[in-house]
Image (cartoon, rainbow, N blue to C red):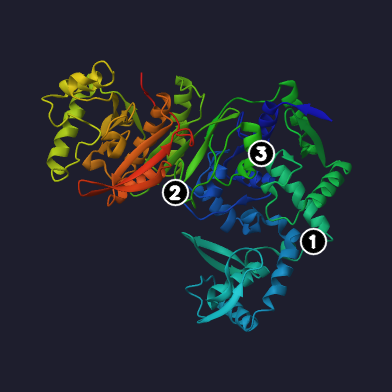
Amino acid sequence: MITITKQQARQFILARQGLTGEYRFVGKEGAYEYVCQAGCIQYDPIDVCGKNAELTLWSRVKGFQKTMLQELLYKDRLLVDYADKELSIWPAKDWPYFSSYRERSLALGETFEGLEGLKEQAMDYIDKNGPVSSDSLPIEGEIYWHSSMHWSGNWHKLSSAARSVLEQLYTDGELIISHKQGSRKYYDLARKHLPASILEAENPCKDEESFVTWRVLRRIGAVGLLWDKNSTAFLGIQLNAETRKIILAKLTDDGKICPVMVEGLKSTFYYLAEDAPLMQRIIDGSADLKPRMTFIAPLDPINWDKSLVLALWDFQYAWEIYTPAVKRKYGYYVLPILYGDRFVGRIEAVADRKEKVLRVKGLWWEPGVRQTKKLEAALDQTLKRFCKFNECKEVRMETIMLTAPELKYTEEIWAFRKEILERDAENENQFAGCLSLDDSNSAEEWIRICDLRKREETCMEVGTQVPSHTYLAIRVSDNRLVGIIDLRHHINHPILGTWGGHCGYSVRPSERGKGYAKEMLRLNVQNAKKLGIEKMLVTCDADNAASEKTILANGGVFEKTIDVEGTLMKRYWITVNLLDHGDGVDGPK
């Protein structure tokens, strides 16, 4: 058995996936070819910057447009929506293999009271009137029903009769999805769209064992390289450890897969025998590995086994869409950034389709990634391609950096001060984190004060007993000052140790509600790490829900509520080394 390095394992997977070197998949034909290679791609209706299936194809298919997938599904009928790895999209030619799914659906359907009559009624209506959704099918009421293969319906309470009967006929194979309007599905008779040669074909798998074996083989091909472990890449397949080992041994004996070891990992890996020439090119260094940059979908086949990604790439990714906002480490819909054979960062991009703007809300580089001109050029080109894919006209970077006050920002600093005085006059903490800005006669004077406050030996000159750094939160896209935050070197002071804490911050009134406070604090925690601060005390008024949310989002742990001269304040502690807060950009010097 051969042994390869982790880098070779990464290169093999990426080459197999079409994510490195010259594009192997091009246009609509290439999109279909990739789905055939992967066996299935997962479907998810959430559309922040493209749906999961669309993102999966965009990342590796040159010239891919969203309309291509719609045509393959609902015009050409080369692909179908159906269950496999959860809800998926797979080649229509594989319909015969899933006959056991349809048989299981039919058997379960017989157990629901009243369903058979509704099925006849629905089929007759659709035959005469064409495609329907659950809203347009004239069947009223509710019944007890749930799906045989995914989470639709309810196990212990009533469900909409119209939706239930359509979903049942869909899993039975009598209906397929005719088209979609947004996320709403319209169903039509399968026989009107798929040929009899597919619908009536005999299942190539003679029993459940051969069906599971076929699916395991297909999942290995989807990822490229899978290990003999309880892998989430096998999700949806009834597969315990004993069965998995038996199937892998059989596929090896039959010459369909090849075993390989990866240096530093104990488990045996497997790849398709047909990919042996590619493996040899990886080993001898002749494979096309020209680096490309792309963004990877949350449910992309390369992400199916996140433990595998961690083991080979040392990259830990979590899709935080279902994580409460206050507990998210990065953002709602964050995509890994792949460049060459490494995951170099993460990006949160939102397509504002009304304004035709692709808004980059967050960009996080992995530790050790050097932000070279070559990297910046690759990101710029990838964002332009992503912008076009989302039918936007411009990319707008809404990411921020923390930097020390400098003379080049004097106009922005004074405009910030003016806006706060005019629009935040009633707030007694209007200049939190930007001490002396309200009393300064000029931006230049305030910059000098900030510089003196940084050092123990000079901070007393400007009326502070504890040294601190002050940072400007500058939006990268337009150099606009959106906020100011400070960082006290310690809190060995009666006020700071009680309710002042390690930092205070202010966000420009016109820029509030955009998540900047959360990002400012995240970057400041990293700066605290550079100063050797292990735990940060951060406080807020007890009734300030927005500030409390910002603190919680950065790992703040509530300690207690205190009374400060009649004002209730909450104390939170952030353990600096507990979370990876990324880079604070220009940290303390």
Rendering coords of residue 125 (x, y %): 56, 79
Residues under numbered marks 1 and 3 in contact, where contact means CB atoms less than 8 Å apart: no
Query: Residues at badges 3 and 2 in contact (C-beta under 8 Å)?
Result: no
Q: Residue furthest right?
A: 253
Mark 2 nearby-residue class (10 Å; few <14, some 14–19, many ≥20): some
Q: Nearer the viewer, mark 1 or mark 2?
A: 2
Residue for badge 1 = 203
| Residue 441, quarter of picture | top left
Q: Quadrant of the C terminus?
A: top left
Quadrant of the rendering where the N terminus is positioned: top right
- The residue wearing badge 3 is 308
Q: Tag 1: residue type?
A: Asn
Which residue ends up furthest to the front in the rendered image?
494
- 275 sits to left or right of 19: right
Residue occupying the point 83% across, 42% down: 256
Total numbered labels? 3
Q: Earlier in the sequence, mark 1 or mark 2?
A: 2
Based on the displayed image, in which of its 4 quarters is residue 75 positioned? bottom right
Label 3 vs 2, first from the N-terminus: 2
Q: Is residue 367 left or right of residue 91?
A: left
**Is the C-beta separation of discs 1 and 2 under 8 Å?**
no
